[in-house]
Amino acid sequence: MAINIVKRCVAIGVASVLLSGCVGSNVATSKLMEYNVKAVDNRYARGGLNMAMSPLYAVTVGADYLVLNSLEFWTGENPISGQPHIFDTDTDTWLEVNSSIDESLHSAPIKISTSE
């Protein structure tokens, strides 16, 4: 009985990280790509370097997806650059919802109101 509860809690925790982790600026992967481009000035050498670095890209994508993007989503800012989360940037949108929801839900981190 207790094992089933633990399994469910772990599954919910993993799902919440995975579902929020796909959204973010992918800062670790972007930094690795920046290094790849700056390393050499020839497109073919960059392509070869990219292939050689593919295991590193797998690590950075995993770090972005599971950790960094999740932190960025839930805290409202990128943990490396300190920039606001891409979902909190002002832009011309097709659907306006902020005017119909509580002010505390307009940006991260979500603040729970204790007043009634």
Image: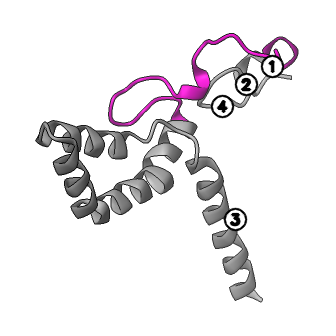
Q: Compare residues 113 and 39 and report the one nearer the observer.
A: 39
Q: Residues within 10 Å of mark 3 (few under 14, many from 20)?
A: few
Pinpoint residue 51: horizontal percent, then vertical percent: 27, 61
Q: Which residue is mark 4?
A: 110
Q: Which residue is mark 1?
A: 102
Q: Which mark is residue 12?
A: 3
Which residue is at 69% across, 10% downward? Answer: 92
CA separation in Å, label 3 and label 2: 22 Å
* Chain part drawn in magenta: 75-101
Question: Pointers 1 and 2 in contact (CB under 8 A)?
Answer: yes
* Relative side of 54 to 36, left or right: right
Tell me which amino acid carries mark 3: Ile
Tell me which amino acid carries mark 4: Ile
In the image, residue 18 sits, relative to residue 10, either above or below, namely: above
Indicate which disc, 3 or 2, sits on the residue closer to the N terminus: 3
In the image, residue 70 sits, relative to residue 9, either above or below, namely: above
CA separation in Å, label 1 and label 3: 26 Å
* Relative side of 69 to 2, left or right: left
Q: Which residue is mark 2?
A: 105
Pinpoint residue 15: horizontal percent, then vertical percent: 66, 62
Question: Pointers 3 and 2 in contact (CB under 8 A)?
Answer: no
Q: Compare residues 35 and 16 and report the one nearer the observer.
A: 35
Which residue is at 67% across, 71% downward? Answer: 11
Indicate which disc, 1 or 3, sits on the residue closer to the N terminus: 3
Tell me which amino acid carries mark 2: Leu
Question: What is the secondary structure assignment of the residue under circle 2?
Answer: helix
CA separation in Å, label 1 and label 2: 6 Å
Indicate which disc, 4 or 2, sits on the residue closer to the N terminus: 2
